[in-house]
Amino acid sequence: MTMEKIKLLLVDDHALLRDGLRRIFSLHDDLEVVGEAADGQAACALAKACRPDVILMDINMPGVNGIEATRQIKREIPEANIIALTIHDDEEYIYELVKAGVSAYILKDIETNALVEAVRKVYRGESVFTPAVTAKMLGEFRRLAARQSMPEEPLTRREIEVLILIARGKSNKEIGEELFISEKTVKNHITNIFRKLNVHDRTQAALYAVKNRMLKL
C-alpha cells in the first residue's frame, strides 16, 4: 500500500534555507515538497496550483511579504494550513500572523525533529506555538484588542466544554474521548463555535476563550 504523503510548499527568499528544508523533509517517507517560492506573490500562485497540505511561510521577503501572502492564501483557500517559519519573535509579527490565520509560529532555530513533528501536527489540524511565543501573542492581543463581547447567539453548555478543550490544545479525537462523543459530533460543535464567535480557526477560538477567562470555568 502506498503511503499518503503530506504535500509541502516552502516559501522563503533564501535558496539555501529552502534546500536545507527540502533535504530534511526528504528523509521522511510521509513528507513531500511539491513546490518552492521565493516571495509571497509566487507563494499565492503555487498554493492555488499545487494545493499543498502545509505551507511553511517566511515573513520578510521581497514584494509580497509573508503576512500579506498568508492573508491572500487564507482568503482564497480557507482550509490552508500555514506555518510561519521565521527568525523574528516580535509581538507585532506574531499578532498579525495569528490574525491572518497561521496554524503555527515557529522560529528557524527549532530542532529538526521538532519541526517535522510540527508539520505533522498542523496537517492533523492542530496548532503549534511555543510557550514563549504564546505569551507574547496573548500579551499583544491584550494590548491591541479590546475584550471581545459575548456572541449574540450564546454558546451551548456543550460548545463551551468543547471550546475550553480546544484552548487547552486537545485534538478532536481527544475532545471526543473526554466528552464521550464522536469525532463527527466534535466537528459539528466546532463549526457552530466558529460561526457564533465569528472566528476562522482553532487558534482564534482558543484566544477568545483565554481573553474571556473561560479556562477558569
Image (cartoon, rainbow, N blue to C red):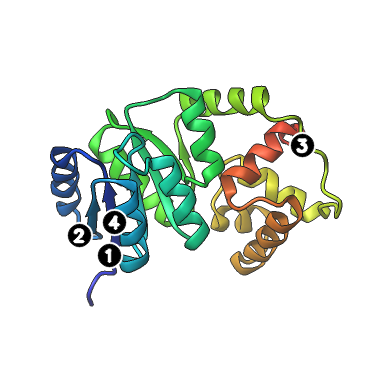
On screen, residue 188 above or below 152? below
Task: Check contact, mark 2 vs mark 4: CB within 8 A.
Answer: no
Do the numbered discs 2 and 1 sit on residues whose CB atoms are within 8 Å?
yes
Task: Kindly indicate the quadrant of the structure image that contains residue 181.
Answer: bottom right
* Place of residue 104 in the rendered image (x, y in percent of width and height, measured from the top left): 44, 41
Which of the labelled discs sits on residue 148, or is there none? 3
Task: Measure how far apart labels 2 and 4 are at the Cα level.
Answer: 13 Å
- Image position of 135 (left or right of 154): left
Image disc number at residue 29: 2
Give the mark, 2 or 3, whose residue is nearer the N terminus: 2
Comes first in the chain, label 4 or label 3: 4
Confirm whether residue 101 shows in the render. Answer: yes
Image coordinates of residue 60 in percent, x first then y, are 33, 34
Residue, disc 1: 5
Amino acid type, residue under disc 3 in the picture: Gln
Q: Considering the image in quadrants, where does the N terminus appear?
A: bottom left
Total numbered labels: 4
**Helix, strand or loop for disc 3:** loop
- Disc 2 versus disc 1: distance between alpha carbons? 7 Å
Report which residue position mark 4 lands on.
8
The three-letter code of the residue at mark 2 reads: Asp
